[in-house]
Amino acid sequence: MLNLSCEKLQSMKSLLISLGVLLFLNSPVTEAQTNVKIRKKDFKTVKEGFKEAWSHVSAGDDYFKERSIWYGSAYDEYRQAMVYNNVNPELNYKTGVAALYSDNKEAAADFLLKALGQDNELTDDILLMTGRALQYAGRYDEAINTLNDYLNSDVRKAKNNLSDAAKYLQECNSAIELIKDTLSVEILNVGTNLNSFADDYSPAFSSDFNTIFFATRREIKRSSISLTDGKYDENIFQSNRVNGNWNMASSAIGRLNTAYCESPLYLAPSGDELYVYTGYQNGGDIKLSIKEKGIWKSPVSAPFKINTGGAETSLTFSPSGNEVWFVTTKGKNSLGGKDIYFIRKTPKFKWSGPQNAGPNINTPFDEESVRFSEYGDTLWFSSRGHNTIGGYDVFYSVKDSSGGWSKAVNCGYPVNTPWDELFFNPDKNEKGAFYLVSNRKGTAGGLDIFHGRNVPVKTIVQGEPVQLPPEPPDTIIHRVIVESLPVKPDTVVVKDTVVVIREITPAPVLLPEAPKEIVLYLTGRVNDSETGDPVMAKVDVIDISNDMVIGTTASSDMDGSYRIKLPAKKSYMIDFRGTGFLSDMKRIDIPENYSAEFYRLDMPLVKVKVGKKVVLNNILFQTGKAILTAGSYTELDRLAGILQENSLMRIEISGHTDNTGSLGLNSRLSEERAKAVVDYLIQKGISSERLEFRGYGPQQPIADNTSAEGRARNRRVEFKILEF
């Protein structure tokens, strides 16, 4: 599936294959069978709708054969084909596999179970695929039974499939044990000021945690597409935190980003040295950039010898600065996969040779993203070995009095999930808080940066706080008492059985003498206009009187809900922006006599995809003419804003009429009106090369022309996304 490597795909004739940055997030299972054929005669049920459905099957099959990043597109096509026939076993199998290999893993189990129920011999790997999908769905008992059925079956099994099944079984059993000691933590996506629909990862923080550098594979320029996986090569972005909120990230200033791909690894406490990974060179090396007079210089060789012919993908310094810990694919005495190594300063202030961190930390599988705690007595890292519950999990190891490191301990659930969790960083600005990177459910796309915090468990009964018995000692995350080990209490996770709370209701502070505050909350849900699925979006409240943003929140990735306090009963514009969706804005007018505590505004957002058509509301013309009225400007300004936000988007503006009057006149008028909209957008600074216009007259109705209401709906202006 996702592959964050910056490998340079090179032909056998001329170039070597170069390994890239992280090399983690391979496909969730061994390659699925691609020779499963959906037969037309088995798929067809009735004539009506078949032609369109079969076109989606064919398109899905084309994507499915390409594998890699195209599984997501295959999934979208197959889902549309299922509107016509959702019981075909081959279609369900391929839809489930496409989900499993894309960002839709949580949906895979239902499709594969349906295929399995109809034909349990459909493919040799259907039990393996279904077991893995059930693991992602958190249905561990079912996953264990299904994986055991696979291992005990008589079907032909590839050697790597057998080892995969055994590992998935181990992960499911680990998950069952770790969930028994669920941690009381809240983990939320940091939002679209940092994250995008592409992969965002490898954060490096300043010592005060108010500056962040991170790697992103979002689109920056057309020429930066990786030949390996079709994604954009990684570049370094940065953001600053002001009043507790991260500003909109932008490309790092200076010469950090080059023709190669770069990821930030470690920002020195001084703030003027940034260690970066550079791809396409020697398998992938660690280099150093120096900031001089506020400008980052081009990365140069690191001042110590840790680069090999393999890929060095992670680096950190101990708090004392006397040790450098790093990850490499090609170190001596490797236990297998990527291992963690370290070098030390000698008494003569030279660096020692690399040493493997040993079996308490490394495994035959991959390790990644190594970090120290503030005092250097705890090492955080991610691993696909030990007792992971799936993919990369975050682990910690504690230094003992002799300088050795304890056996790695899993940080527990929900810090870890069947997805990948990497780049764990304790947040120095908030006790018990941390950052991590994951591709779990709730991302804007691919890998995202998340923020977690310890949550005290409180009970509210009928609106009143209930006094709970004292908590058992040492339940706060990042704190532990290790017998016989002198460990400072800032680091490790202790697991006590608690309840995970998705939405925390704070216990009210009872102040009898204080006047009762009049409160008003704007609340609602943001969802996908087509599927109804929840959408994580930034929600800005704008005061119409001064055009100032007076409040910002984000909708939940779990159910799309949001809530924000309004300062007064008046008029506002509410701006919704979700990555991968068209932004939208609605006006609300709250009268002074409004007595309810909540004002509800739900917002369906339109997902951006080529071919998508969107009706522009309130586009008005003078009767019988192609002259826009002033009432149209608000909607057209919003469209201009969308085009400015998405600089590579090309659209077609189309005019439509009802069926009254002359066909020729309607066609001409609709085209002139579409051109009037294009002319307005050009005046707003949108390049004419990004705009096309057509008049379709009455040829594409969206409603019945026999009623006045239907004719009104057909008289419209649309835009269609041509490129994105």
Image (cartoon, rainbow, N blue to C red):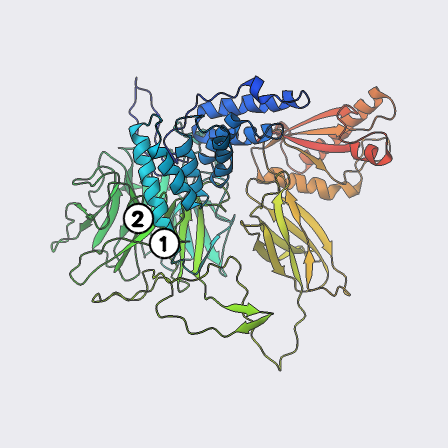
Packing grade of label 2 (10 A; few <14, some 14-19, many >=20) is many
Residue type, numbered disc 2: Asn
Residue type, numbered disc 1: Leu
The disc label shown at residue 485, or none: none
Say if residue 6 shows up in the picture. no
Residue 620 screen position, x and y as percent:
80, 38
Give how far apart the Cα atoms at labels 2 and 1 are: 9 Å
Under circle 2, the secondary element is: loop
Residue at (60% x, 55% y) in the render: 562
Q: Do the residues labelled 2 and 1 touch (CB within 8 Å)?
A: yes
User: In the image shown, does 693 or 91 lie closer to the viewer?
Assistant: 91
Residue at (48% x, 41% y) in the render: 106
Residue tagged 1: 178
Residue 632 screen position, x and y as percent:
76, 41
User: In the image shown, does 525 or 590 lie closer to the viewer?
Assistant: 525
Residue 365 screen position, x and y as percent:
27, 41
User: In the image shown, does 166 or 336 lie closer to the viewer?
Assistant: 166
> Residue 96 vs residue 146: left or right?
right
> Residue 485 vs residue 258: left or right?
left
Q: Earlier in the sequence, mark 2 or mark 1?
A: 1
> Residue 403 vs residue 690: left or right?
left
Q: Pick the quarter of the image with the C terminus.
A: top right
How many numbered badges does the structure rendering display?
A: 2
Residue 479 screen position, x and y as percent:
33, 64
> Residue 655 vs residue 211: left or right?
right
Q: Identify the residue at the far left of this view.
A: 348
Residue tagged 2: 387
Under circle 1, the secondary element is: helix
Q: Which quadrant would residue 475 be assigned to in this image?
A: bottom left
